[in-house]
Amino acid sequence: GLAGGLEVLPSVKAAVCYLSGVIENSRSLSIGGNSTSTKQGPGVAPAQGSMHHQVLRSGWKPDLKSQANYRLYAVTDSKINRKNERDLVTAVCEAVKGGATIVQLREKDASTSSLVSQAEAVIKVCRPLGIPVIINDRVDVAIAVDADGVHVGDDDMPVRTARKMIGPLKILGVSVKTPEQAMQAERDGADYVGAGACFSTSTKADSTLIGLEMVQNIHTSAGIPVVAIGGISHSNAEEVLRKTSVEGL
């Protein structure tokens, strides 16, 4: 951290947080043993990778992973923005004014250069307000713009690989549809899971409807925050919270 330009206190805090995670995830390592051995028992975590200096350079935010951040989760959608004749920044500003506590940039059709520009614009709006910005799928873009985290799904980068790339201090979210998937995501390093779809939704036509009972089962099984997703609006939000007890929508 010091070598990356941080002050002493943020460097020490970041190092303590990182090393705590290393110790916890390295319980099974046989330090000084045969480095060529691949023997691992069931549930044994893989060896910790090297320290991610880009994470330390970005500073340490002690409240970044607060459960309260997931309460009202906004996800961008260029098609809806075009329909409502508004640009991305305007949409994000309106979401924030409406109470969004976290924003995910999800623009599947954007080129890499366009996505980087969009991410920088969203971060410029949200960071001064303390609102985390998550990049959907593109771990490389999240690292490039120093976003607060990344969200991956079934067809995206494996959860453990994403965690190694972004380091221990950033937020990692995973889309799940079953309690088993949620528990595996937690073991692999996820900070939260997005469970759904709760209802049919036009924003993601290929999404499988799992219903509120399954979302509630996922919440019961997971030891990390659960965000209910899919077809949720002001008309059914209260029902979702009441029937699932999730941490966010």
Image (cartoon, rainbow, N blue to C red):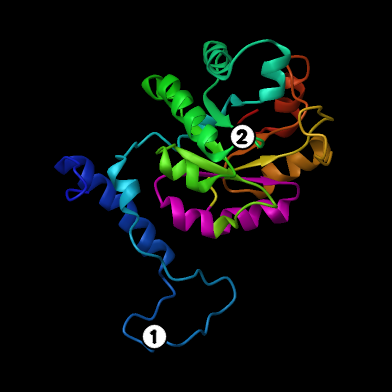
Which three-letter amino acid code belongs to the residue tagged 2? Ala
Q: Residue at x 55, y 15 (%)?
A: 99
Other-residue count near label 2 (Cα within 10 Å), few / some / many at <14 / 14–19 / ≥20: few
Front residue of this view, candidates 53 and 217: 53
Range shown magenta? 161-189
* Residue 127 image point, x, y percent: 40, 25
Secondary element under disc 2, as helix, strand or loop, is loop
Which of 196/114 is in front?
Answer: 114
- Up-down: is 237 above or below 39? above
Q: Position of residue 216 (x, y in %)?
A: 74, 39
- The residue tagged 2 is 110
The residue that appears at 67% across and 10% down in the rendered structure is 85
Report if residue 192 is visible in the image. no
Q: Report if residue 53 lies within the magenta region.
A: no
Relative placement, left or right, of 85 versus 48 is right
Closest to the camera, between mark 1 and mark 2, is 2
When asked about the image quadrant of residue 23, the answer is bottom left
Task: Kindly report the distance in space between the C-alpha atoms of the residues bearing marks 1 and 2.
Answer: 43 Å
Query: What amino acid type is highlighted by mark number 1?
Result: Ser
The outermost residue toward the left is 8
Helix, strand, or loop for circle 1? loop
User: Which residue appears at 33% of the width and 59% of the height?
Assistant: 51
Q: Earlier in the sequence, mark 1 or mark 2?
A: 1
Q: In which image quadrant can residue 95 be found?
A: top right
Instruction: Determine if residue 88 is in view.
Output: yes
Q: Which residue is mark 1?
A: 35
Question: Which x, y percent locates residue 82?
Answer: 69, 16
Relative horizontal placement of residue 180, taking residue 46 as reference (left or right): right
Q: Position of residue 115 (x, y in %)?
A: 54, 34
Mark carried by residue 138 = none
Is the residue 180 above or below the residue 8 in the image? below
Tell me: residue 231, above or below residue 49: above
